[in-house]
Image (spheres, rainbow, N blue to C red):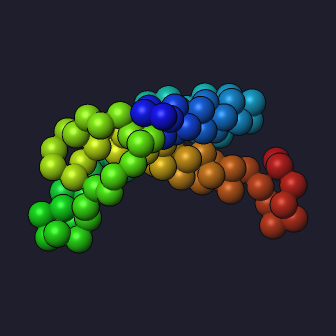
């Protein structure tokens, strides 16, 4: 089913955002810093992808789950969404780690 992968990414991002909102771990604590970190991570990984594509290391496989829209050769539309999700997840996990003590209890 085309678009299912993008839908899954957005659904997962919604779940992470719900946790972020509930515990004020990243965007709901410091929106500007979170946006900057997510943007920086997304750009970094897009550049990484571009280098991998240019070197022939990264290639897009075929899948019925993708929309079929490419932003560049071997760079599907879903990739920036995934990279933004990955960066946001990392920031939320970092915020969670900062809030937990060595005992594992949330402060």
User: Residue 69's spot in the image, x, y percent?
Assistant: 26, 35
Q: Quadrant of residue 65?
A: top left
User: Residue 36's spot in the image, x, y percent?
Assistant: 37, 38
Q: Residue at x 46, y 48 (%)?
A: 87
The relative height of residue 58 versus residue 12 in the rendered view (above or below) is: below
Q: Quadrant of residue 98?
A: bottom right
Q: Residue 70 versus residue 63: which sits nearer the camera? A: 63
- In this rendering, position of residue 8 left or right of residue 72: right
Q: Quadrant of residue 14?
A: top right
Q: Residue at x 39, y 48 (%)?
A: 63
The relative height of residue 9 versus residue 31 in the rendered view (above or below) is: below
Extreme residue toward the left, this view: 54
User: Residue 58's spot in the image, x, y percent?
Assistant: 26, 64
* Res 30 seen here: no
Q: Residue at x 60, y 38 (%)?
A: 12
- In this rendering, position of residue 85 left or right of residue 48: right
- In this rendering, position of residue 9 left or right of residue 102: left
* Res 62 seen here: yes
Number of marks drawn: 0
The relative height of residue 37 versus residue 29 in the rendered view (above or below) is: below
Q: Residue at x 17, y 69 (%)?
A: 56
User: Residue 85's spot in the image, x, y percent?
Assistant: 48, 42
């Amino acid at each position: 089913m085309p678009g299912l992968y993008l839908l899954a990414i957005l659904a997962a991002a919604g779940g992470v955002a719900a946790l972020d909102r509930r515990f004020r771990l990243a965007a709901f604590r410091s929106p500007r810093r979170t946006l900057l970190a997510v943007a920086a991570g997304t750009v970094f990984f897009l550049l990484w992808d571009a280098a991998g594509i240019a070197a022939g290391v990264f290639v897009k496989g075929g899948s019925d789950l993708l929309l079929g829209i490419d932003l560049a050769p071997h760079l599907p539309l879903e990739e920036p969404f995934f990279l933004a999700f990955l960066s946001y997840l990392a920031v939320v996990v970092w915020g969670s780690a900062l809030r937990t003590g060595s005992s594992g209890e949330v402060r």
